[in-house]
Image (cartoon, rainbow, N blue to C red):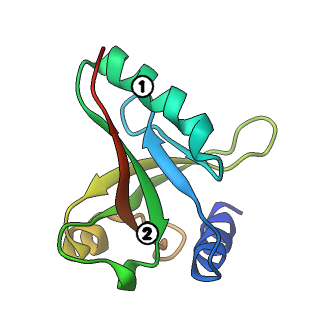
Amino acid sequence: MSIDYLEDLARAIDNGKEIFVCPGLQTNEWILSEDKEELRKKAQRTANGRKFQVNIYRLVNKMDTVAEDSYLVVRRILEASPTGVPRFQWSIVDTREAADMMRDVSQGPTPYFGAVVEETFDPE
């Protein structure tokens, strides 16, 4: 179940696993990876395609954020891919209050994550 995937992801982050994310080319598409090097290429491609600055974020426990950090929120749980991979519609927001209000509650309140900027990419 998709919410189980999110809860497992939250536990992994709480246990110190480094997970990085960056936006993809499609609206509300986010790419998650443990490999920041892999995301650098995707972040640059997104910056070039969208013609604006793109960040790579490191996910952290939402309670470990500071004022300048953001929050990555699941706005909607989508139907799983044909191979069974969970799919989500994500958004990045600036406040914990916005994250609480925007998160999907269709299967129970989804966890959301603090997002700390690691790197920034400008369009070439």
- Helix, strand or loop status at disc 1: helix
x 30%, y 20%: residue: 50
Q: Which mark is residue 44?
A: 1
| Residue, far bottom | 63
- Please give left or right for residue 123 compared with residue 87 in the image: left
Which percent across, then down, holds residue 39? 54, 37
- Please give left or right for residue 62 compared with residue 99 in the image: right
Q: Mark 2 is on which residue type?
A: Phe
Q: Which mark is residue 21?
A: none
| Residue, far right | 83
Separation (CA) of disc 1 from disc 2:
23 Å
Q: Mark 1 is on which residue type?
A: Gln
- Please give left or right for residue 116 compared with residue 14 in the image: left
| Relative height, residue 24 to residue 117 (above, below) | above
Which percent across, then down, holds residue 9? 63, 68
Which percent across, then down, holds residue 82? 77, 35
Q: Which mark is residue 113?
A: 2
Q: Is residue 25 something that shows in the picture?
A: no
Q: Assess whether mark 2 and mark 1 are in contact (beta carbons under 8 angstroms).
A: no
| Relative height, residue 27 to residue 3 (above, below) | above
x 62%, y 45%: residue: 79
**Which quadrant: the C terminus?**
top left
| Relative height, residue 15 to residue 6 (above, below) | below
x 42%, y 25%: residue: 44
Which percent across, then down, holds residue 12? 66, 74
Mark 2 neighbour density, 10 Å: few (under 14) some (14–19) many (20 or more): many
- Helix, strand or loop status at disc 2: strand
In this orientation, which residue lies closer to the viewer: 68 or 113?
68
x 39%, y 61%: residue: 73
Residue 113, image quadrant: bottom left
